[in-house]
Amino acid sequence: MSYNESNISSYQVLHCQVLHCQVSSCNKKLTLTNNFECECKNYYCIIHKFSLDHGCTFDYKNKQKNLLQKSLIKVSSEKVITAGTILNDTI
């Protein structure tokens, strides 16, 4: 398993520095098992790990909207034949 530079640097940051919860009123020491990185690239304790608990500014709605636009396939046809047009053509 190979690591790129960003993985190594984040690993070094987690293991060489003492991290604390980014919420100003909490300031708990984060250990290896109770640190959670949010999409806003900050680390939080288990109490503040959800975006509503720490006032996250990351736009989750826009992220999911972009993912859906990339993954959905546009389906279209040249002409839709209805039952009325089939009956009129045969008479």
Image: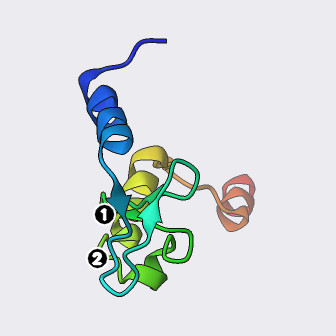
* Residue shown at 29% from the left, 41% from the top: 13
Using the image as rendered, state which of residue 60 and residue 49 is in the foreground.
49
Per the image, label 1 sits on a secondary structure element best described as: loop
* Amino acid tagged 1: Cys
* Amino acid tagged 2: Thr
- The image position of residue 57, as x and y in percent, is 28, 76
Residue holding disc 2: 57
Q: Is residue 27 above or below residue 88?
A: below
* Residue shown at 69% from the left, 67% from the top: 84
Residue holding disc 1: 40
- Asked whether residue 41 is in view, the answer is yes
Q: Is residue 74 left or right of residue 7?
A: right
Q: Are marks 2 and 1 in contact (CB under 8 Å)?
A: yes
- The image position of residue 4, as x and y in percent, is 30, 20
How much space separates mark 2 and mark 1, taking CA atoms? 7 Å
Q: Is residue 33 above or below residue 49?
A: above
Q: Is residue 82 above or below residue 6?
A: below
